[in-house]
Image (tube, grey):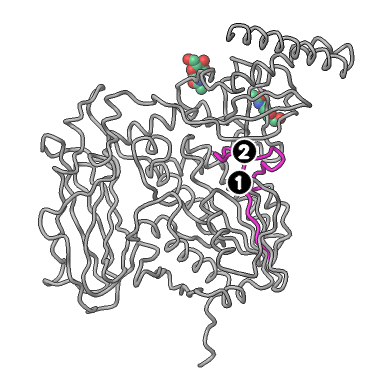
Amino acid sequence: MCRNLSKYALIFLFLALSGLIFLLGNIHTVENWNCHTISALYQLQSRIQTAFNPASLPKFYHNRTFCSHLGQRPSPEDELEEHYLLNSISWPEHSHQPAPFSLRLTTDPVHSFFAILPPKVGREWHLGDQLEALVQVHDFQGRPKHYGGDFILARLHSPELGAGVTGTVMDHKNGFYSALFPLLWTGSAQVEVTLVHPSEAVAVLQRLREERSDRVFFKSLFRLGFLSETTVCNLCLPPDQQPLCNFTDLHTGEPWFCYKPKMLNCDTRVNHAKGGYLKHLVTNNEALLFQSGVNLKVHIHASGPDRINVLPPLKEPTKIAPSGYYYDNSWKPLNGFKMRQFSNSDITTQCLTNKMIYMYGDSTVRQWFEYLIALLPDLKEFNLHSPKNVGPFMAVDSGHNILLKYRSHGPPIRFSTVLSSELRYISNELDGLSGGPNTVVALSIWAHFSTFPVEVYIRRLRHIRRAVLRLMDRAPGTMVVVRTANLQALDQEVSLYNSDWYSLQLDQVLRAMFKGLNVHMIDAWQMTQAHQLPHALHPPPAIVKNMIDMLLSYICPEKKSHTK
Ligand SMILES: *[C@@H]1O[C@H](CO)[C@@H](O)[C@H](O)[C@H]1NC(C)=O
Ligand SMILES: *[C@@H]1O[C@H](CO)[C@@H](O)[C@H](O)[C@H]1NC(C)=O
């Protein structure tokens, strides 16, 4: 019975296939008959095999600079800047151990400790003083380490007061680190020191960044009529394995490539999407360096007290490093600028009346879009039929003449399907803006660049910076706000693609490249580090609220009182 059925099913399938092939052959011109038949069969076959097979990924040359020097050659001036930037983020030497290293000799947060150093003057701490904690790292055998390069974060905080500030960590490159904190509130303050990665793990991350920029890969669908093929894409692909489609942006020279589909032309590309994450990037031995609860984002304890009491000031506070701190769960910038509270929709709407706000970047600025449309009942999202979480998105409050738009940055973007027609580079978009005093541009570009050499990020920011300058020259009064990178939750897997160490390096480059320009920074790094809530790629609403309050405070600063 079963055998008969399956025999009929086979015959039926055969007839159906023959009919389909006959039909296809007749619909299309005779000269293309052969090609289309083969294509149709190829298509059927690939549909059955689920179209896309990451096992056939290209072999990468695992050597340096393969990706970073694609695209236009930088001018001598740009090259100089690049050298300066790369120098400024160079990481201390990590290890004197020959490979394969032994875990026993790497940094162990349990054996490491810190101590709060006594006040420089007197016996008490006062507002405006600087607190120093000295960290000494040890290995798993309890022996002190004699070289630096560990990625350590430090924070001074007080949960009772909703207060927190980031510390500046200095690597003495001999196993000692100093964490320096300004004392910005009176009352209790507790030091928290976190080992994010041991120096040996940073060495692994550094190697992956230079040699395995294929570890996140992308794909595109090509389609013409009923034919479709999906191929692998990336910022750089080995050129000698299969023919390539060159999607390098003609305006900026930003490189992008896909493997050419077998049957279709390059101009039949329909969309772009994240392909996936390569596995088995590290050896079993190296994986031991990324263990949650062991040596990945683990606190280092104090050898003595970890808490101090801060008294009212004795003298004028000295100059301080962080960009701000939390008090009463609200961000207090330290550059003399006052952040206002925009807690209700009325004052927010009043602030944004007659404004056009353009947000460009990754999902961390899309959060701002989502926050604002949730906050403002009259700001209605206009349905552009865009895919969820991808965009572009637009919201309008026609009563108050408010326009809010969000668009993702160009490739490499690890979103689910983005239409090719919606793949835009921020610099090109900025060149298309009229700008002016009613225009606000908010940028956030960092999270999708962590798997590439830093040169790739520098080149992208250089294009954006030029477009920002052109925009501000032709349309004075345009406001540009740049959101920095933020800390996120890390486990072993996330670390290899998105470690905070990568973000830190990009973040330093971002700040340096926009320094001295008339743009406003929103320090997402410190706002996530200083806050008591756990690190998250998409910071929780309590932190987003502070960012939005900063954004709105830049747009609508507190009016100076007219009293003389
Ligand atoms: C990388 O390695 C491959 C194969 O060993 C070699 O052909 C290529 O020239 C190298 N590329 C660079 C930029 O060093
Ligand atoms: C890709 O196209 C750009 C722009 O036309 C060109 O400069 C570049 O050399 C091409 N790259 C390759 C590998 O074909």
Q: Find residue 35 and report its image quarter.
A: top right
Quadrant placement of the N terminus: top right
What residue is shown with label 1?
390
Distance between the Cα atoms at labels 1 and 2?
8 Å
**Rendered residue at 24%/65% (across/down):** 130
Q: Seen from this angle, which residue lies furthest front?
A: 1
Q: Nearer the viewer, residue 21 or 545?
A: 21
Q: Earlier in the sequence, mark 1 or mark 2?
A: 1
Rendering coords of residue 504 (x, y %): 40, 47
Residue 409 among magenta residues: yes
Residue at 49% x, 32% y: name it: 216
Let me know if residue 404 is in the magenta part.
yes
Please tell me whether residue 441 is drawn above or below residue 378 in the rendered image. Answer: above
In this view, 542 is above or below 487: below
Circle 2 — which element?
loop
Residue 47: image x %, image y %?
A: 64, 21
Q: Is residue 254 left or right of residue 509?
A: right
The residue stretch that appears in magenta: 403-427
Based on the displayed image, in which of its 4 quarters is residue 46 positioned? top right
Which residue carries the number 2 mark? 417
Q: Are marks 1 and 2 in contact (CB under 8 Å)?
A: yes
- Viewer can see residue 149: no
Q: What amino acid type is highlighted by mark number 2?
A: Thr
Front residue of 44/415: it is: 44
Specify the quarter for ligand 2.
top right
